[in-house]
Structures are given as C-alpha cells and as structure tokens.
Image (tube, rainbow, N blue to C red):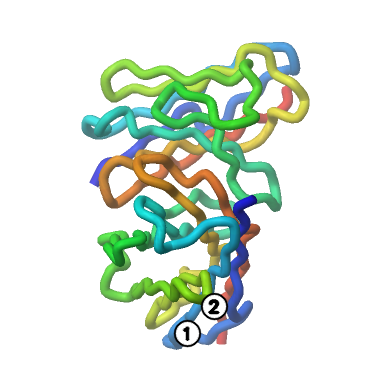
Amino acid sequence: QITLKESGPTLVKPTQTLTLTCTFSGFSLSTSGVGVGWIRQPPGKALEWLALIYWDDDKRYSPSLKSRLTITKDTSKNQVVLTMANMDPVDTATYYCAHRHLAAPFDYWGQGTLVTVSS
Amino acid sequence: EIVLTQSPGTLSLSPGERATLSCRASQSVSSSHLAWYQQKPGQAPRLLIYGASSRATGIPDRFSGSESGTDFTLTISRLEPEDFAVFYCQQYGRSPYTFGQGTKLEIK
C-alpha cells in the first residue's frame, strides 16, 4: 500500500525559504523507474507542477520556478525534500507530493499541506 | 512547454446526464501521455484516466477518455451524484508536466 504525507511549516514570512518534506511508504526511491513529484494549488485555483526527482537522482523543475526550487531525496529515510527560496504571498498554496512510476502519471498523492506566506 | 486548455470552465448538468469535458494541447503530447484527474473539495486529486484512454484502477466504466490529435476528451456517460467535482487534465510525457486550468462539473 503506497502512502505519502507532506510535512512542514504552515506559515512562512516573505523572503524566507520554505522546506517541505514528503515521507512515503509502500515503495522505494531506489527502485528503477520510480519518481516523486511536488504539485501546488493556490486556494481556489488550478494545480501547478513544481518539481520531480527520479530513482536515479534525475531532477526536473518547472521553468518558471527553477531558480527558486531544489528537490532532493533521502532513500534511507524514504523522504523527498523540496525547498523554495524567497517566498512571496502569491506562493500561498496547498503543496502536494505524489508518486509516479516509469511513464505513468501521478497515481498516488499525499493529503497536501497548506502553506501561508504572510508577514 | 505544452499548454493545456480545458473547456468549458464550468459545466452544469443533472445526475443521469452525459458529461463531455475537453482538453486541448498546444502541441503534440508524446505517446498519448495525457491523464485526467478528479478533485473534490478538500481532497487531493484522484487519477481517473492515463494514456488518454485507459482507466486507472478502481475507476468505474462510466468514465472514458479519447483523443484526436491534440484534442482530448473525458466523457462521463451517466452522471452519478458523487461525480460532481473539478477535473484536470495533465500531460506527463515531457517536462514541464503541465496541468490544464480545470473544468468544474456542478449540479444543475
């Protein structure tokens, strides 16, 4: 049974760096073809893909946010960490992590965590 | 970057009716790597369709997907009360793995 759960601060100040952790179970990020991605959703708005890391440490980023994002994995802890620098109120959103395998879409999602950016 | 444009923005229908949702890609989607998700308020998205036309595990057969070139369609043959939600398409074949802006399916 695959599960994912996001954790991190619920409130950050403008210009701060956000660090989110996705802790998962039921699969390993050392298995060929496996990836974990991050997606966010501002309140009342659409989904936006942010970043993805694969089992072989290949990393992909949204071009519009690439300069602010870093994605890393800790295979031994079954965790993926996303950092986003220079947070702004427009970054207020629910942040989700999700699993994908090979050429499949995101088939398992975490429950999401709401991050508010405010001074 | 592949831009996905969904239409209509809102669709108002009654239970028992047929729903047709559209997703148009700005360029070819590699290997039909187009997915549909359903999202209900306060919940994470749920995968419905992958590969443009294959149902994900546990998805009822009233949900179907099709493609014609860069146009993709999600059809719900006979709406059940639990089907009303927001639906998103996503292309997952080429980074960045973009989403459409969503279609809200509401009860008429």
Kindly identify which numbered label has been placed on residue B95: none
Q: The disc labelled 2 sits on which kind of residue?
A: Val
Q: Quadrant of residue A65?
A: bottom left
Left or right: A83 as drawn, with respect to B41: left
Residue beneath label 1, please? A14
Q: Secondary structure at mark 1?
A: loop
Residue B84 spot, x, y in % from top left: 69, 30
Look at the numbered discs 1 and 2 and tell me whether their residues touch, using CB distance below 8 Å.
yes
Q: How many marks?
A: 2
Q: The disc labelled 1 sits on which kind of residue?
A: Pro
Residue B105 spot, x, y in % from top left: 63, 30
Left or right: A47 as drawn, with respect to B14: left
Which residue lies at the image location 52% right of the left edge and 86% below the top edge?
A13
* Closer to the camera in the image, A89 or A3: A3
Question: Dot 1, crowdedness within 10 Å: few (<14), some or many (≥20)?
Answer: some
Which residue lies at the image location 56% right of the left edge and 49% below the top edge?
A108
State which tag comes first along the sequence, 1 or 2: 1
Which residue lies at the image location 54% right of the left edge and 78% below the top edge?
A117
Residue A16 spot, x, y in % from top left: 45, 87
When the figure is inspected, residue A41 is found, relative to residue B1, above or below; the finding is below
Chain under disc 1? A
Residue beneath label 2, please? A117
Left or right: B9 as drawn, with respect to B42: left
Chain under disc 2? A
When the figure is inspected, residue B53 is found, relative to residue B46, above or below; the finding is above
When the figure is inspected, residue A93 is found, relative to residue B35, above or below; the finding is below
* Closer to the camera in the image, B57 or B28: B57
* Closer to the camera in the image, A57 or A98: A57
Q: Secondary structure at mark 2?
A: strand
Which residue lies at the image location 46% right of the left edge and 70% below the top edge?
A80
Same chain under badges 1 and 2? The reply is: yes
